Amino acid sequence: MHRDGIGFDRATLLSVFSSLCGFSNDNGVDLSLKCCFQLHCLTIKTGFISEIGVATALVKAYSNLGGEVADCYSIFLETSGRRDVVSWTGIITTFAERDPGEAIFLFCQLRQEGLAPDRYTFSIVLKACACLVTERHALAVHSQLIRAGFENDTVLANALIHAYARCGSIELSKQVFDEMVLRDTVSWNSMLKAYALHGQADEALQFFVQMDVQPDATTFVALLSACSHAGAVEEGTKIFETMFENYGISPQLDHFACMVDILGRAGKILEAEKLIRKMPMEPDSVVWSALLGACRKHGETQLANLAATKLKELDPENSLGYVVMSNIYCSAGSYKEAGLVRKEMKGLGVRKKPGLSWTEIGNRVHEFASGGQRHPQGEAIRANLEELVGQLKVLGYVPETSLALHDVEEEHKEEQLYYHSEKLALVFALMNTRSGCGGVIRIIKNIRICLDCHNFMKLASELVKREIVVRDSNRFHHFKKGLCSCNDYW
């Protein structure tokens, strides 16, 4: 159209930017990003970039297509003096998942400019709050939305339930739920998910009985997830087998994945594999990941190979299949096979997701990578960690050296385990908070906590006389007085 010399206007650009977000396959996204960049240049050349609506639509297109956050932010900066709530919400949405701390900062800037957040702005910033270490920001946003007159808004109350639960405060989630004037299915599901996230299956099942709205498919995913985290095999099986008969809801992929997880965690791996074969639809990567995790837990190599192969076929760039198989071989002492898996992974260019942990000290979030070299206090942290390890060994800590990835000397295997990111975060928190203060130490980890770190945290909570709360990629672990809320079942 442009090449043919046909004119275009603001409405044309808005329509094109909207259509760019419809591509889901990798080739479509790459092509759309290229097109988005070209249109960006065109809007600058024609002056349309100065229109706040066009700039906001461009930011949304870049964000939805996975474009660079810096590009989105530079476009946003060009709208200085003309920004409205819509444009602010657009840039906050861009940062909400990729850099939630920055999203909170931008929300504060919006308020400083004297603009009033709308319902959608609050929902997005609460989504960002849910990604953070503590409930501090969620509490602040909660107070602001009350002052803005949204205290009885069901959608925002649902977002608050989710945010508080993700930040580790299920009590605040329940308080919001209890104070709601109007509850919908999402409200009940949000609380069920909160109980599942914290491994509270009994509470979830009792809560479901009280549910006074029609449950949906998501309700049963939350229930089955709660049963999985608590090892409630009998209850989970009954729910799965009766959900269609009692509620007319046919099991979908997510329900099958939960059920495979329930059976697999309990050691019923053959039953889990049989269930997969009976599925009325093709199992997806989540289903195979659940089976693979069960095989890792129980050392089932043959079925693990099947699950890992299927996972590689469905999601070639996912490192999970390779990493878990390597760990299974290492645990069995089969270092040659583990090396071959790693070699295959490297040859295909598949990269392992790095283990990262975060903790908040003095209103500032600190990030830790395994090894500890990236942190400015790295040397001091490592020295304090070695001292802590010595103290824990007196209490009975024995490093799970079978988890080390290479056939090396026992001493070096222990060193590989010492510097996992959550241990570094814990030591940093202990170094920077008053001894004997009794405050809860909160840590977020981007991948599943390993067995060695789990044992380490239990003993550390007993030694330092403080509760340690770790949220990994799967659930919450509340370590207190040498025990974990998961009862060592995760």
Image (cartoon, rainbow, N blue to C red):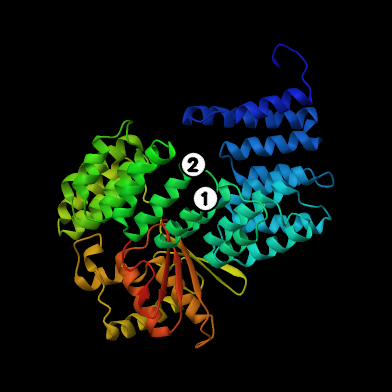
The secondary structure type at the circle numbered 2 is loop
Distance from the alpha carbon under mark 2 to that under mark 1: 9 Å
Asked if the residue at tag 1 contacts the one at tag 2, i.e. Cβ–Cβ closer than 8 Å, the answer is yes
Residue 324 visible in this rendered orientation of the protein:
no
Check residue 216 in the rendering and tell me which mark sits there, or answer none.
2
Q: Residue at x 18, y 51 (%)?
A: 300
The percent position of residue 45, horizontal first and vertical second, equals: 76, 29
Graded by Cα atoms within 10 Å as few (under 14), some (14 to 19) or many (20 or more), the crowding at tag 2 reads some
Query: Could you tell me which quadrant the C terminus lies in?
Result: bottom left
N-terminal label among 2 and 1:
1
Residue 53 placement, left or right of 240 = right
The percent position of residue 127, horizontal first and vertical second, equals: 60, 52
- Along the line of sight, which residue is nearer the eye, 477 or 350? 477
The percent position of residue 303, horizontal first and vertical second, equals: 19, 45
Residue 123 placement, left or right of 335 = right
- Along the line of sight, which residue is nearer the eye, 409 or 456? 456
Q: Which residue is mark 1?
A: 189
The percent position of residue 122, horizontal first and vertical second, equals: 69, 52
Q: Identify residue type, mark 1.
A: Asn
Q: Identify residue type, mark 2.
A: Asp
Q: Residue at x 24, y 50 (%)?
A: 325
Graded by Cα atoms within 10 Å as few (under 14), some (14 to 19) or many (20 or more), the crowding at tag 1 reads many
Write down the quadrant of residue 285 in the picture: top left
Q: Residue at x 64, y 55 (%)?
A: 157
Check residue 333 in the rendering and tell me which mark sits there, or answer none.
none
Q: Residue at x 21, y 65 (%)?
A: 402
Query: Could you tell me which quadrant the N terminus lies in?
Result: top right
